[in-house]
Image: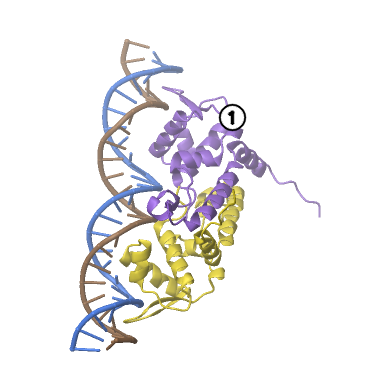
Chain colours: A yellow, B purple, C blue, D brown
DNA sequence: AAAATTGATACTATATTAGTATCAATTAAA
DNA sequence: TTTAATTGATACTAATATAGTATCAATTTT
């Protein structure tokens, strides 16, 4: 069971790149090359981000994409919802013939509990946080005295 | 994003049926009819459960399937793993070109944390627990005095 | 005017999920 | 002892989701 698909995975990486260069435009091509993301695939992902007001774009030479929304306000939950649809543990709770009138769906309660746990865990993770983690990880490790 | 696929969903329902009739054999046909699960599909799911020692079967007339493992020892995590593969948040942590030597995968830490949270949440939910919830839900509601 | 870029959209390929069908072997019961 | 109900094994099809490619018009800098 794979929780993050390539869409979301690529989208996160691209956003990290944009967040790191906040205030300037990065072209899809440069992001694709640097982060090993299929170019045309990435372009679609970026266009989707524009629709959700996460980033803005500029056409033409020297154009590209730039961060719009505060990276600390962009959660992994949001990105999953954009690229994989709302997190739902099972369809069962929506199907009348199973969970409707007479027999109550036994899974419903547990499912909703887990659903909210999963969502809130992913909500704790923002692009801003990931970026700080990344920067910390890229710092040279301090030498230890013997 | 759908966490439980039909496989797992059906499997859970079938196990609940078997757990409720612990000690006697239920045919695939009867389970399929009662719980609205496609017959041949269900048969495959049941055969898989045999391989994992959750249930046993008896051939021929009056044959069917019977609970083997203690329902309290069967977790939803196990069923997800059987029918949807091990819960993994992203493939990224296994791909050398991203997470390998030089650049550490920034997502790795968060991913593993969330992964374990998700797994442990599903581990809290056993077939035994669901069955008790189901039985409780089916009890007639006590009347309230006005 | 040329080159680099995005916007929009259509297309193909692959994998996963869902569901169906078939036939041999087994067992209970008529 | 024959028949019917059942599982075991396996192959097949259909539908959907995921992943990736291609094209062309519009825009903008040089």
Residue farthest toward the front in the current orientation of the protein: A146
Using the image, determine if residue B142 lies above or below residue D22: above
Helix, strand, or loop for circle 1? loop
Q: Is residue B86 left or right of residue A43?
A: right
Residue C29 % position (x, y): 45, 18
Which is nearer the eye, B9 or D6?
B9
Front one among B118 and D30: D30
**In the image, A46: left or right of B10?**
left
Residue B6 or residue C23, whichever sits in front: B6
- How dense is the environment of label 1, judged by Cα within 10 Å: few (below 14), some, or many (20 and up)? some
Look at the picture and state if A78 lies above or below B32: below
Q: Residue placed farthest to the right in the image?
A: B146
Position in image of residue A75 (x %, y %): 54, 65
Residue at 43% over, 59% down: A9
The answer to whether residue B146 is visible is yes
The residue at 54%/61% (across/down) is: A136
Name the residue located 59 percent from the left edge and 61 percent from the top edge: A124
Chain under callout 1: B
Q: Quadrant of residue B132?
A: top right
Q: How many marks?
A: 1
- Image side of residue B112 versus residue A14, left or right: right
Residue A106, visible in the rendered structure: no
Which residue corresponds to mark 1?
Answer: B70
Eyeballing the image, is A126 above or below B7? below
Residue D7 is situated, as x and y percent measured from the top left of the image, at 42, 27
The percent position of residue B137, horizontal first and vertical second, equals 65, 44
Residue at (38%, 54%) from the top-left corner? B97
């Amino acid at each position: 069971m794979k929780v993050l698909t390539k869409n979301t995975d690529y989208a996160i990486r691209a956003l990290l790149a944009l967040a790191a260069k906040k205030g300037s435009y990065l072209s899809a091509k440069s992001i694709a090359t640097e982060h090993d993301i299929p170019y045309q695939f990435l372009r679609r992902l970026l266009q989707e981000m524009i629709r959700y007001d996460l980033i803005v774009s500029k056409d033409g030479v020297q154009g590209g994409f730039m961060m719009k929304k505060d990276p600390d306000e962009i959660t992994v939950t949001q990105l999953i919802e954009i690229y994989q649809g709302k997190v739902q543990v099972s369809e069962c709770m929506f199907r009348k013939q199973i969970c409707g009138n007479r027999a109550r769906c036994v899974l419903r309660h547990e499912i909703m509990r887990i659903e909210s746990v999963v969502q809130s865990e992913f909500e704790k993770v923002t692009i801003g946080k990931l970026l700080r983690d990344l920067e910390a990880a890229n710092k040279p490790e301090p030498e230890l005295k013997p």
